[in-house]
């Protein structure tokens, strides 16, 4: 079997996690923002317990078709047409969550944080960052920037990622990695594991941040505030 047939168009960042043995068949896996399923062929073909979510009905149809070809016993319910920020799965449903090239579609910081907290299980995240191209991006407001490649994206900084790692009570599985593409854009890989702050669970973090949002910004826009702040 050719590699392209076995792995499809899998993101190299996700392939790296497979090679390191961090994704195993005994895990429940979610591809959040799966698109047409570029990261799914290997998992479907090899019997992994994988689920997929995307807001696009067309994308979910493509995933259903792919699954029918590669994993005939896969349940149609495992691919759902939902937004990343409002998924129907129970809390702590998954052992490994893939969110690759999704979070930069956030419309503002509040939207970004809403998606992030919804994803907070075990996270593999590849997102757009400003690392290395700070002087070349044009601010549009609400955390969004115009990039040299002509696209408009929500960008994060290393400081923001490290602050959120701390607020979530997470641990970096490996150092942050950033790839700069010819000065046009940069993409960071942020790989986290749940850490040692049992009092700060998903629902607690979200409710605290929502409370701070309403008190500080009058319900109009989120501001990133430490959940440890009273």
Image (cartoon, rainbow, N blue to C red):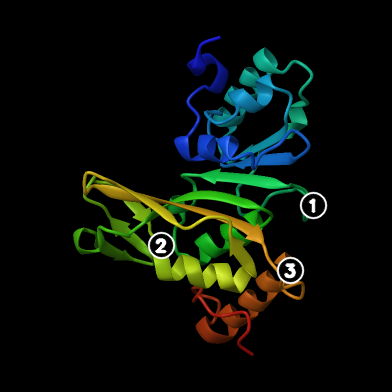
First in sequence: mark 1 vs mark 3: 1
First in sequence: mark 2 vs mark 1: 1
| Position of residue 146 in the picture relative to residue 42 (left or right) | left
**Residue tagged 3:** 201
Q: Whole-percent x and y of residue 223? A: 49, 76
Residue 79 in view here: no
- Labels 1 & 3 near each other (Cβ < 8 A): no
Position of residue 215 relative to residue 67, above or below, is below
**Residue tagged 1:** 90
- Labels 3 & 2 near each other (Cβ < 8 A): no
Q: Looking at the rendered structure, which numbered label has been put on residue 150?
A: none
Q: Residue at x 24, y 59 (%)?
A: 137
Q: Nearer the viewer, residue 210 or 5?
A: 5
Q: Residue at x 47, y 25 (%)?
A: 9
Q: Whole-percent x and y of residue 187? A: 38, 49
Report, in whole angstroms, how far the alpha carbon at label 1 lies from the one at label 3. Answer: 14 Å
Q: Looking at the rendered structure, which numbered label has been put on residue 156?
A: 2
Quadrant position of the C terminus in the picture: bottom right
Position of residue 197 relative to residue 16, above or below, is below
Mark 3: give few (<14), some (14-19) or many (20+) Cα within 10 Å: some
Report, in whole angstroms, how far the alpha carbon at label 3 lies from the one at label 2. Answer: 23 Å
Q: Residue at x 49, y 47 (%)?
A: 102
Element class at badge 2 = loop
């Amino acid at each position: 079997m050719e590699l392209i047939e076995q792995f499809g168009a899998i993101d190299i960042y996700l392939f790296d996690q497979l090679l390191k043995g961090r994704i195993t068949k005994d895990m429940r896996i979610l591809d959040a923002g799966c698109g047409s399923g570029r990261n799914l062929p290997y998992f479907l073909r090899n019997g992994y317990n994988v689920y997929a979510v995307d807001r696009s009905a067309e994308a979910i149809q493509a995933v259903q078709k792919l699954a029918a070809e590669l994993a005939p016993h896969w349940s149609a319910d495992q691919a759902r047409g939902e937004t990343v920020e409002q998924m129907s799965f129970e809390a702590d449903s998954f052992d490994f969550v893939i969110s690759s090239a999704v979070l930069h579609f956030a419309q503002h910081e509040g939207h970004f944080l809403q998606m992030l907290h919804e994803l907070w299980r075990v996270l593999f995240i590849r997102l757009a960052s400003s690392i290395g191209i700070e002087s070349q991006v044009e601010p549009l407001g609400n955390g969004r920037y115009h990039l040299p490649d002509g696209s408009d994206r929500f960008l994060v900084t290393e400081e923001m990622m490290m602050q959120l790692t701390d607020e979530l009570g997470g641990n970096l599985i490996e150092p942050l990695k950033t790839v700069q593409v010819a000065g046009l854009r940069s993409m960071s890989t942020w790989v986290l594991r749940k850490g040692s702050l049992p009092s700060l669970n998903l629902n607690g973090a979200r409710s605290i941040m929502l409370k701070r949002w309403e008190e500080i910004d009058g319900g109009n826009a989120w501001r990133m505030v430490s959940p440890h702040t009273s």
